[in-house]
Amino acid sequence: MRTMKRSVLSLSRATGRFTSGVRVLPSFLITGAQRCGTTSLYRALAQHPLLLKPVLHKGVHYFDVGYARGEPWYQAHFPLWVSAALLAHRYGARAQAFESSPYYLFHPLAGERIAADLPGVKLIVLVRDPVERACSAHAHELARGFETESHFEYAVELEARRLAGAEELLRESPFALHHSHRHHAYLARGRYAEQLDRLEPLIGRERILVLDSHRFFKEPEGVYDRVLEFLGVPHLGYPAFERHNGRPLPRRVPKVLGQALRDHFEPYDARLSRWLGGEPSWRR
């Protein structure tokens, strides 16, 4: 079954690349942050008939780890122009393709590549309590086999050493991959303001929407309305809102460590206020 699935995907990619010139490019991207509800938002938006997900899978990961493959490979993942045109005619509004790759927000070159290759694109970023995000990411990487340190506190201690020189390497060797940068950045990925500030001059503040994922899960209709307004897409009813990719934590974070991490993130959380239009929910 797995071999057959790989064969189908390979054939689909080959067909897509052959027809890439008549396929749409995305109008917006969900760029992160990892473990912040990106899959849940993606699946909610994909239920809108004018929002066109990739043909094969949610995250194409072109602007971070697949950039060497070239734009025809990327464009091959999206629907045909004729399909988008038919939907636009049916609903009286432009159909928009999109994808969700949460490493884009953190990768040091992804923003530059997105700005160069998708002028006018809009970005959606979800953020959550960075301590919760770090714990969730560790459990996620552990379950997938990308993490070998089963104790969260020890993994946090190892992070600085694991990530030392990673950004420099990725900038100096643009097509290089760095395992720990992608899979072990538990604290670094939660310093959201640093990553958003890097994106702002490249994309423009008005084309970046930052959402508090706690609010999304608590009041999904209001957040969904805000996303459609940001994208300029007509409201055609609410989708089914569900949580996806949730993973229980193996054990509670020690109280002392939890407080130390909250103190660590405090200045970064404060800088999020201008992006969220108020204090993050986890700081209230």
Image (cartoon, rainbow, N blue to C red):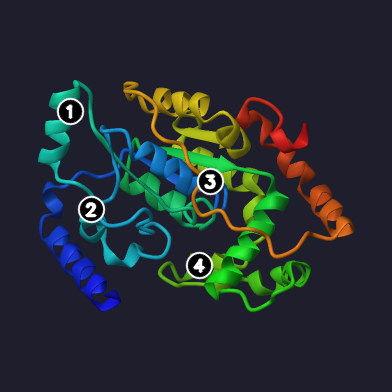
76 vs 5: above or below: above
Residue 233 falls left or right of residue 183: left
Q: Amino acid at mark 3?
A: Gly
Foreground mark, 2 or 3, reads: 3
Residue picked out by circle 4: 170
| Numbered disc 4: secondary structure | helix
Which residue occupies the foreground of this view, 133 or 109? 133
Mark number displayed over residue 37: 3
Counting every numbered tag in the picture gives 4
Counting residues from the start of the chain, the first of labels 3 and 1 encountered is 3
Q: Amino acid at mark 1?
A: Ala
Check if mark 3's residue and mark 4's residue have beta carbons within 8 Å: no
Counting residues from the start of the chain, the first of labels 2 and 1 encountered is 2
Counting residues from the start of the chain, the first of labels 1 and 4 encountered is 1
At label 4, counting other C-alpha atoms closer than 10 Å, the crowd grade (few under 14, some 14-19, many 20 or more) is some
- The reply to whether residue 185 is in sight is no
Mark number displayed over residue 75: 2
Check if mark 2's residue and mark 1's residue have beta carbons within 8 Å: no
Q: Residue at x 47, y 44 (%)?
A: 40
Q: CA distance from mark 1 to mark 4?
A: 40 Å
Q: Amino acid at mark 4?
A: Leu
Residue picked out by circle 1: 88
